Amino acid sequence: MSDVYLHDYVRTPRAKGSTKGSLHHLSPVDLVSGLQRALAGRGLDPAAVGDVIVGSASQVGEQGGNLARVATLLAGWGDAVPGGTVNRFCASGIDAVAQVAARIRTGEMDLAVAGGVESVSRVAMFSDRAPLWTDPATIERVGSIHMGVAADLNATIDGWTREQLDAYAVETHAKAAAAWDRGDFADSVIPATRADGSVFDRDELIRPGTSMESLAALAPAFADPVQDAVALKAHPEVGEIVHHHTVGSSPALADGAALLVLGTAESPIRVVGAATAAVDPVVMLTAGQVAVEKVIARAGLTPADVDVYEFAEAFSALCLRLRRDLGPGPDRLNPGGGTIAMGHAFGATGAIMVGQCAENLTRLGGRYGVAAVSGAAGLGVAVLIERVDG
């Protein structure tokens, strides 16, 4: 078995997931192939790449047809580099990283690229018309509800107040703005060109002035009697779902892509292992934390041993739950901000989490870091990394 190391990490800036976003004019294939060309420009030899695996949550239209292979051909990497696309909903990008690391570890290949992409502005959420979203019988049997309703269900179960949820959102916006001001992402973010020819080089969803007062003015975003009825049928013990999440304490939809280069040659960051998890599909959003707990235990560590938790902010409630259960304070949980502030580009988010975890480990001088994402239908994936140069 071979050790697996992170050799490079690049991403686009995250743009608003709408027609007003700075990446709307670029297709998902454009985003991925652009990053592939950037990796080649940074010294990666495409001929040495054993595979390119890209995660995407809505694989239809411009994100269909195995975009990883198409992007690899359009990037000029030659005919001999394979490509494949995976879907584990919002955990697709981190699952691509976990799969590639496992294949390298077993000796199948020595070098590969893993990542993710989502262009919500061009391929809308739920546009694949999957049975989980559109078929009444499937929805009834599975208990499929909107992620925001699941977040409010979790907040109700745990007893989080509106003020606690808003306070977490204020915190992550402040940390994201500070990270950009420090230049934390200078090495990994590859600037893009807007449709008007200007340079786009900074996540555009961050609101540095976010305050408790500004968030208090927002109405609950997910109150829906029909959705509540589905959730309460599965969990009648809750009695009533209290709707506290707003657009301010929820992850903003984003366009973006990210790629990581993994291989057997030694580098400062080692991929220790990964874990997948599944939970009740109605509660849904707790699977990322379960995966974190699994991968930490499997490595013989305790939660206190982990210096950086990079946890996709699938609503404030789940971050507060992880903080309560595993103990990381603001300095260890998303120390450079997260998806509530910088945006959630479904398929790309997990790859960004792994890369940002490595960046924060290096910046803070920590040893162990874990990245994790919760996805629809109760799925979660976590990746554990170690800084070995300190």
Image (spheres, grey):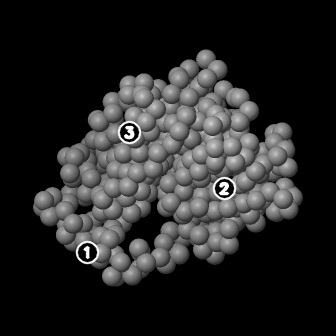
Q: Nearer the viewer, mark 1 or mark 3?
A: 3
Question: 277 or 42, which lies in front?
Answer: 277
- Outermost residue toward the bottom in this view: 136
Question: 205 or 30, which lies in front?
Answer: 30
Q: Quadrant of the N terminus?
A: top right
**Label drawn at residue 226:** 1
Amino acid identity at mark 1: Val
- Outermost residue toward the top in this view: 390
- Which mark sits nearer the N-terminus, 3 or 2? 2
Q: Nearer the viewer, mark 2 or mark 1?
A: 2
**Does the CB distance between marks 2 and 1 fall below 8 Å?**
no
**Does the CB distance between marks 3 and 2 fall below 8 Å?**
no
Helix, strand or loop at label 3? It is helix
**Label drawn at residue 369:** none
What residue is shown with label 2? Answer: 53
Residue 255 visible to an observer of this rendering: no
**Label drawn at residue 293:** 3
Question: 162 or 295, which lies in front?
Answer: 295
- At 25% from the left and 74% from the top, the residue drawn is 226
Amino acid identity at mark 2: Ile
Question: 35 or 45, which lies in front?
Answer: 45
What is the spatial separation of the Cα atoms under label 2 and label 1, in whole angstroms?
38 Å
Neighbours of disc 3 within 10 Å: few (<14), some (14-19), many (20+): many
